[in-house]
Image (cartoon, helix red, strand yellow):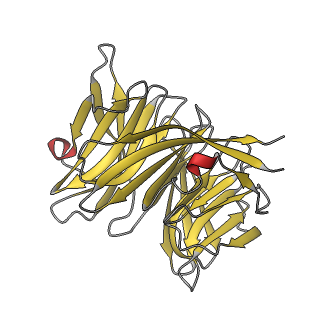
Amino acid sequence: MPMRMERTDKIKLAFCGVPVSVATTNEELYMHCSFRYEFINVFDRSDLRKVKHVIQTGDYNFHPRAIVACSLSNCVYVLSLKGSQLNMNSVERITKDDREQFVVSPWISDLSPNDKYVISISTEGSLILSKTEGADAIIRIYRVDGSFQQELRLNLDLFYVSRIIPKSNGNLLFVSLSQGFKTQLTETSLDGKIVRQYQSSLLAPDANHSDSKDRLLIVDRDNKMELLDPQFNALRVTLPMEMSDNLWTNPSLLHYDGVRNEVVVIDYKFGIGASLSVFNFREDK
């Protein structure tokens, strides 16, 4: 099935340092940024041209590494480092009270120190944290209320896992690097069986869902991309003429907004700054 890609918005962002990660709730977009110190900018989805609030994470004594959002509970989870040596892993939770004020509170603190975790969230609201131990991926899953649900040990022997994408069929999709430092996708069942793999031709900085049907988008510099169906078959993409050579230059972050069924791409270049583009994909019938 050929697909049509459309851009619904493109915005030059006000200076925000280096964008590190992005998350979206029902009404807001959160952007974790780094510039001498760490902070989280909050934008209203109806007006992405200005920052409406800044969460100074130093005020809460943690150093953020990545953020994800849960649309069911309308909150943001922050994978963070704590302690005098910043070696204690934890997860903080950002919510809003009855007066629409932001509330930051500790959420998960039973993670092992000195390990590098990857954080993601399922469509059912389960929080997924993964670390690598030798050739194994250690997966810890937490319920919506923050209680521990289960731990899985999957022997996958993957190099540099940057993202885990829960699929609608219950499987997990690992985004990693091949020996040639190109993007590799590995879909596994929860018992560790590898269902399928895909070796991209791109030195891509990121990959994520492109829509609600488990299609996948891989982006690379200078307008390069690959769009795959759920079985990792390449899809043909039709672009409006004015977009064909004007998608992105240095894409640094790719985020899928499941509430709006659209993709957010952050294009960043040192010394120039960041821009934000919003895309959607439609079946080109």
Relative image position of residue 222 (x, y in whole percent):
50, 65
Residue at image coords 56%, 85%: 180
For residue 218, which quarter of the picture?
Answer: bottom right
Viewport quadrant of the C terminus: top right
Relative image position of residue 41 (x, y in whole percent):
29, 39
- In screen coordinates, is 249 left or right of 95? right
Q: How many marks?
A: 0
For residue 137, which quarter of the picture?
Answer: bottom right
> Looking at the image, can residue 67 be seen?
no
Residue at image coords 33%, 51%: 274
Relative image position of residue 3 (x, y in whole percent):
75, 48
Relative image position of residue 114 (x, y in whole percent):
32, 70
Q: Residue furthest top?
A: 99
For residue 152, which quarter of the picture?
Answer: bottom right
Residue at image coords 27%, 21%: 101
- In screen coordinates, is 57 left or right of 180? left
- In screen coordinates, is 160 left or right of 55? right
Nearest the camera: 197 or 211? 211
Q: State whether residue 284 is above or below residue 218.
A: above
Q: State whether residue 147 is above or below residue 161.
A: above
> Looking at the image, can residue 154 be seen?
yes
